[in-house]
Image (cartoon, rainbow, N blue to C red):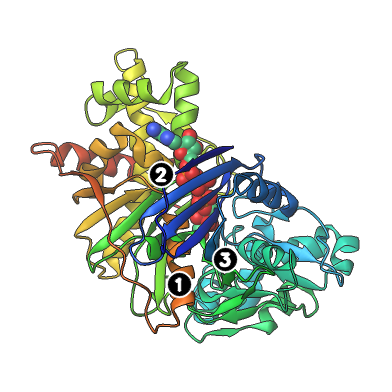
Amino acid sequence: MEHAGEHVTDGQTLVAGVDSSTQSTKIVVCDAETGAVVRTARAPHPDGTEVHPDRWWDAFEQASSGGILDGVAAVAVGGQQHGMVALDETDAVVRDALLWNDTRSAQAAGDLTDELGGPSAWVDAVGLVLVPSFTVTKLRWLAQHEPENAARVARVVLPHDWLTGRILQQGNGFEQWTTDRGDASGTGYWSAATGDYRPDLLERAFGRDLAVPRVLQPYEAAGHTSDGMLVAAGTGDNMGAALGLTLHPGDVVVSLGTSGTVFTPHRSAIRDETGAIAGFADATGHHLPLMCTLNAARVLTAAASMLGVDLAELDRLALQASPGAGGLSLLPYLDGERTPDLPDATGTLSGLTRSNSAPENLARAAVEGMLCNLVAGVDALRAHDVAVDRVLLIGGAAASRAVREIAPGLFRAPVVVPAPAEYVGVGAARQAAWALSGEQDPPTWSLDVDSEYAVAAGDAEAHAAVVARYQDLLGRTHGGA
Ligand SMILES: Nc1ncnc2c1ncn2[C@@H]1O[C@H](COP(=O)(O)OP(=O)(O)O)[C@@H](O)[C@H]1O
Ligand SMILES: O=C(CO)[C@@H](O)[C@H](O)COP(=O)(O)O
């Protein structure tokens, strides 16, 4: 548990954002007018792909135990997307929540896809090609594999919905379960294109109807705590990050946390039958086309562990090697993979020879392999005529010097690293300030840039060869999934 804070001036209106993501809860408190971060705290979550929501509450209580929320006028929660929080008639949790990175519902995803008539039928219905991450597939798994638990389920909510409701339940502020467009769009039973639930798809998956949370408008309050703090709608963590960054047309965000994501705000829904891009909604009333990988920052920790070095040394080694790591490639599917849809895949180290078997090449291959998976997402956006003028790098692994210096060549775009901040939490805080203001648009907050990295002269061809080699290896190893 960590706390940090700066002096708060009299008369400042404070708003808070909670990032309840896979590995931890982060809380940021911001000046409602400027967005300046004045307090931060974090607390860890247990590892795993299924977690009881009470652990998220424990982490929230730990992170807020030092008074970080004192004097805060409004709060919002940005949460890891897609998690299945199954509640009974008394709103008690029926079983541990299956998280976005749990792949046990892979067969359910395939069955539901076939039942509706193929990937394009689901894209037409809810803008998604089903993968195990999406909530609807987890409901099918629950109905098929835990019928006794399924019989007790009265309602299904998402992680950010549950934490929002739990905060309100601390007083008399809870009236109903709520969610927002952004997080609802990742369930597989709500459509960003129409703004409506698809109860027919939920019933197809689970076998009967279930209660679902009300979808609030982006600026709408979910309620107030007993001491009067406004609790805003909240959203999914990537939608929160997009709201926390001051994005301009041509900006594409690459987030390197537990998940790797590529996303950009878009005025219309993008339709992608390949499944590379999910047609999510954002937290402002528009859309957030997004690609997500299961493997990101933890590929680097795994490589560091294999080499017996820390992350700083892994960076130094990776930058000591040349582009292409001497021909060594790592397909980084260490936890299976979501995009490409390879839930049972494992990592593949390829091209190992006596001449390239050196620590620096393994370090470089880990960075290049992790990033090349996300290059596919950036190129998928380009294939949908999305301009990629610069890449904004956020998430824990954005702190990696090797990632920052290698990314521009692989993404074929300059990389901008915003000043280190928990942008999911900042975005949630900005939503809280918006709900508090009663205005039509969110407050204008500035974005500080920490550093910028250009495509290194002369390396463009070498980086292009790396990307091509990874595409070839994917095809040879997994049939071009
Ligand atoms: N300097 C660094 N280099 C590489 N990875 C890092 C660095 N600092 C933190 N990380 C990684 O970032 C991850 C946490 O990022 P974060 O965005 O908070 O994850 P999440 O939001 O998914 O919980 C951890 O896996 C951690 O190892
Ligand atoms: O499933 C997705 C996006 O579709 C993930 O991005 C989760 O939302 C988890 O995010 P992090 O814990 O990696 O921030």
Nearer to us: label 2 or label 1: 1
For label 2, being within 8 Å of ligand 2 is answered no
Q: Position of residue 370 (x, y in %)?
A: 39, 40
- Residue behind mark 1: 283
Task: Kindly identify the amino acid type of the residue bearing the numbered disc 2.
Answer: Leu
Residue sitting farthest toward the top: 354
- Residue behind mark 3: 130
Secondary element at tag 2: helix
- Between residues 236 and 7, which one lies in front from this camera angle? 7
For label 1, being within 8 Å of ligand 2 is answered no
- Of labels 2 and 1, earlier in sequence is 1
Marks 2 and 3: CB-CB under 8 Å?
no
Examine the rendered structure and indicate whether residue 399 appears above or below residue 93.
above
Q: CA distance from mark 2 to mark 3?
A: 21 Å
Residue 238 visible at all = yes
Q: Residue at x 42, y 51 (%)?
A: 38
Q: Position of residue 64 (x, y in %)?
A: 61, 49
Residue 474 is tagged as: 2
Q: Residue at x 39, y 55 (%)?
A: 9
If the image is split into quadrants, where does the N terminus sit?
Answer: top right
- Between residues 382 and 9, which one lies in front from this camera angle? 9
Nearer to us: label 2 or label 3: 3
Q: Residue at x 32, y 19 (%)?
A: 360
Secondary element at tag 1: loop
Tell whether 191 sits left or right of 162: left
Tell whether 64 sits left or right of 37: right
Examine the rendered structure and indicate whether residue 236 appears above or below residue 125.
above
Examine the rendered structure and indicate whether residue 35 appears above or below residue 112.
above
For label 3, being within 8 Å of ligand 2 is answered no
Secondary element at tag 3: loop
